[in-house]
Amino acid sequence: MFRTHTCGELRIADVNKSVTLSGWVQAVRKFGSITFVDLRDRYGITQLLFSESLNEQLDANPLGREYVLQATGMVRERSNKNPNIPTGDIEVLVDSFTILNKSVTPPFTIQDDTDGGDDLRMKYRFLDLRRNAVKKNLELRYAVNRATREYLHQYNFMDIETPFLIKSTPEGARDFVVPSRMNPGEFYALPQSPQTFKQLLMVSGYDRYYQIVKCFRDEDLRADRQPEFTQIDCEMSFVHQEDVLEIFEGLIKYIFKTVKGIDYTEPVERMPWQEAMWQYGNDKPDTRFGMKLLNLKYPKHVFADKEDNAHLIEGANFQVFESAETVLAIAVPGCSEYTRKQLDELTEWVKRPQIGMKGLVYIKCNTDGTYKSSVDKFYSEERLKAIADAAGAKAGDLILVLAGTEALTRKAMSELRLEMGKRLGLRKSDEFKLLWVVDFPLFEYSEEDNRWVARHHPFTSPKPSDIEVMINNSPVIENPAEYLKHPYANIKANAYDMVLNGNEIGGGSIRIYQKELQQRMFEALGMDEQEQQHKFGFLLGAFEYGAPPHGGIAFGLDRLCSILGGSESIRDFIAFPKNNSGRDVMLDAPSAVDDKQLEELYIQLNLPKE
Amino acid sequence: MFRTHTCGELRIADVNKSVTLSGWVQAVRKFGSITFVDLRDRYGITQLLFSESLNEQLDANPLGREYVLQATGMVRERSNKNPNIPTGDIEVLVDSFTILNKSVTPPFTIQDDTDGGDDLRMKYRFLDLRRNAVKKNLELRYAVNRATREYLHQYNFMDIETPFLIKSTPEGARDFVVPSRMNPGEFYALPQSPQTFKQLLMVSGYDRYYQIVKCFRDEDLRADRQPEFTQIDCEMSFVHQEDVLEIFEGLIKYIFKTVKGIDYTEPVERMPWQEAMWQYGNDKPDTRFGMKLLNLKYPKHVFADKEDNAHLIEGANFQVFESAETVLAIAVPGCSEYTRKQLDELTEWVKRPQIGMKGLVYIKCNTDGTYKSSVDKFYSEERLKAIADAAGAKAGDLILVLAGTEALTRKAMSELRLEMGKRLGLRKSDEFKLLWVVDFPLFEYSEEDNRWVARHHPFTSPKPSDIEVMINNSPVIENPAEYLKHPYANIKANAYDMVLNGNEIGGGSIRIYQKELQQRMFEALGMDEQEQQHKFGFLLGAFEYGAPPHGGIAFGLDRLCSILGGSESIRDFIAFPKNNSGRDVMLDAPSAVDDKQLEELYIQLNLPKE
């Protein structure tokens, strides 16, 4: 070893020990004829003291930032203690030293508050990784990884590796493909998830499987998406939905406890998908704060069982509300004194193309008990009060109302609620709120193809009570305009998402395990028998040999870590992330390859003409 | 849950409990009006007893092999106990049952001794995985995985994920490549190992890294190679070779102890590469048995310091020996009574194309003290005795001698030794013998390109004492015929392999960490500056910013598991392996993909003309 101790290890009890440390020069300070060096490694920083006798050697071999230094000397008590670091009571009086390697000046400072921009830090990722802030993130990731394995092992889950070179069966996102040299003209695909393999393992009787595994999706990268990402992938046999929720609620709580020291003891709320849409306009609501939606007007076929609040706005001859499909309101606490300018700015905010609303209606619930709104012309103070009461507003609150088509308006109101929550400081990064969203629709409508697509994936089972509806009705959509009236639109799935602070951190379902129902599902998605056989023949085949009831879940490890770490960006929790064009700027990958390589793979380029 | 207990759980203490079990029907036995069912799951087998009262229901719903069955009933003591299984003291008297899923007749029996051939079992891998023998293999693999993580965590190693979509830098094996849709004409490569990333992590200061990670090599598959395989990949900073050997010798011993219950306490022997070649003809000798090589004749420039035994065979005018570059012998214990037929068969064995020798010379050391050989014409009994003594033969042994060119003969003798060891039962699958092979040559000669290639990889450091030789000599080989006299041929590497029972289970090296030496290494391998920058610019760049001394190792998990499991085949220890053409016959992958997919990736097929 080039060291006897790490730079984070020495304490006052080690005084008078002769030690050898190795690490990086964080800082060099000269005081007269004495030189202090802060030596850094993964474990901490230790102060080295070079007395005058070493000056000749130091002059011949000057130390610079990020030099790799090995120093031997005696531990002694510091006269000037530093209470901010664990090694702050001691220093090492250096007898001898060796420069193990030099460093040119780094392009940015290796400190928590670095002066390096994003692009520079990505290019020199190996230096960025030296910063304490990034190191803490990777340590947190490792801790989550370990806690996950510990917990799942306790519950008899078994880590089983599934293959990476599989078959391309695009359904949803695009596959990355890999040309096969040994099978000319044929391609492997990289797995978007080990979904079918974990189901096969259930058929094989491995009743509790898990894997922390890389997955791949060739999607157009939105901010904070990565073409390769890591899942905690799990599957269980002989379970109902409730069993899965219990086990994995336990997993997340165990991670909270082990990694963050947080006792998350209360049971996690379970909210039907429809309720989430109704109350929050969103299937992954941030429940750290209230500000629930008041549904003043909405399409009855979407929310069939819901109370009707239309009387609160009807008959006022206010065309914006009259002509709207949906009218939604939230009561923003303590904002009744918003100025004209602030309200104008909010109006501009909802009119941005990303939100797409035409305008914003407000009602101020003044602290003196009066009401003032942008629609005073149409609504009496009494009617405003009735709306305010229905929205749960108190004196001092500001009511914001959006009106328009259902999907757009609900999404806009969800965004506005989150924005107001953020502005009011209600979305604290050190507060954690879990939620199960359950009872998702089984299908979504694809306008492009006028057919049903699987909301979760084609292996998710319908609710048992909805199986008859699925079997007894044709999936064909005769009238695209009225697809919501098709019986398939109301089929619910045995699917569930785990939501943390408004982010989906995991999702899963109870699976179909009957061959006939799986075939019916594929048909519903527009797959004919030949396509079914080509893509999923192995799974349909497996279902003939005694498939057990089973279900599972997958957590996005990158996202989970970023939320636990209090960050917005998953990149900060990935050692070597890619940028938004899917490039690794440090490696300069992807890159051109030799013609010879392509030839061997029986492919050639087919670039767009200029 | 569909069960209260597993099928491996119930004991005599559970008698009179009401339980529900779920599992697969292993067997159905009728005794008069009573039906016994063996119900199987991952944990074991439990006997179910269906009394007469259920016969009507059983007749309406007959049970078959591999049906998925849920049964509820009372645990009771068996009259006819089965001491061979942990649940053999009890049975469950069934009150009610549900067939959860049916099964068609499996194409082979789900038993330890299955009647299914290799191909059939690969196609129906999900059924093969049900067999106890295969399950035990995957359980062993999981146990090795867990033990590895535990041990490495204790020693401060941190699991850090490295990317799968990287840059193609073929040097040695071929890369699998992945066309990038977002970067037309460009390709990612799948990692052959995370080598450069783990080195970057060392530069970043993560001084102990590990990962259990998939790697990919597009090689022509020999038997028992897989295009994707799993490595236990490790790297450490501030270490010398001795430190790495110690830590990882500890890892393997910990795995032995934890997984196999074996106390492997003796220190692992360390053998220089040259010694392994000299004594065993092989750089991964099986040291479970002796039968070391007697080097009767050999090229002096390969084994410069070795004793000369040529006098034992010289001057006999036996042309086969006289004209040979190399003559090697082994003493096979107890085989002096081999018949003519047996000796002929052995001769045919060494003449097979895979071995390629022209013939075999034998000397029988008869139990009566006489000697009889196939070269009696040339050698007196006295001379035969001298050879026998030098080979360490005792009365009753058989000496086998091969002669020919150095490389071929040494390899052939190594194979013959292993074959004889196998025939004599000296290679026991439950005996484990570890060995470190050290001091490998840094370079190998590539005849095809008349240049040096890295024996391990281009990041392996030369022995410190050989650095001068490397720097002060040109890598150019003026005279290909005499490449062994080039100074580079004798440069030794700081590289080491761990060998278990004659298999390389791990290999690693102390790395180059100085930019200039790394450049020199690339040059030695025939890479000009531009190619160096294109392929490894990021690493050379990183070495400018304070790279610490570091080294590491990677173990082949698949192979390690197969040896621990006493099997010849790594496939048995992989859940979903590929066959020798790199195909997954269950999935039928690789396969053709849609033209649209290729178009989006800016590639097209370029198939060979018929």
Image (spheres, coloured by chain):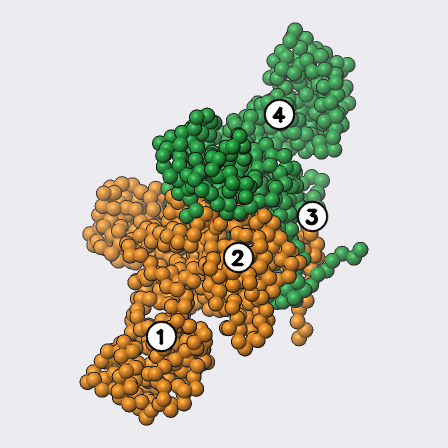
Chain colours: A green, B orange
On the image, the x and y values in percent for residue A327 come to 69, 25
Inspect this view and state whether residue A96 appears.
yes
Return the mark for residue A449.
3
Q: CA distance from mark 4 to mark 1?
A: 82 Å
Q: Are marks 3 and 2 in contact (CB under 8 Å)?
A: no
Answer yes or no: are tags 4 and 3 on the same subunit.
Answer: yes
Neighbour tally class for label 1: few under 14, some 14-19, many 20 plus, Cα within 10 Å:
few
The secondary element bearing badge 2 is classed as loop
Q: Residues within 10 Å of mark 2 (few under 14, many from 20)?
A: many
The answer to whether residue A275 shows anywhere in this view is no
Q: What's the residue at 62%, 15% (across, down)?
A: A334
Q: Chain of mark 3?
A: A
Q: Position of residue A108 (x, y in %)?
A: 62, 38
Of the residues under marks 4 and 3, which one precedes in the sequence? 4
Q: Position of residue B604 (x, y in %)?
A: 69, 62
Which one is nearer the viewer's eye here, A260 or B96?
A260
Q: Please, what secondary structure does the residue beneath circle 1 have?
A: loop
Q: Are the residues under badges 4 and 1 in a single subunit?
A: no
Q: Amino acid at mark 2?
A: Phe
Q: Residues within 10 Å of mark 3 (few under 14, many from 20)?
A: few
User: SS class of the residue under badge 3?
Assistant: loop
Question: Label 2: which residue?
Answer: B459
* Three-letter code for the amino acid on which mark 1 is drawn: Glu
The answer to whether tags 2 and 4 share a subunit is no
Task: State the mark number for residue B307.
Answer: 1
Q: Which residue is farthest top?
A: A368
Q: Which residue is mark 4?
A: A422
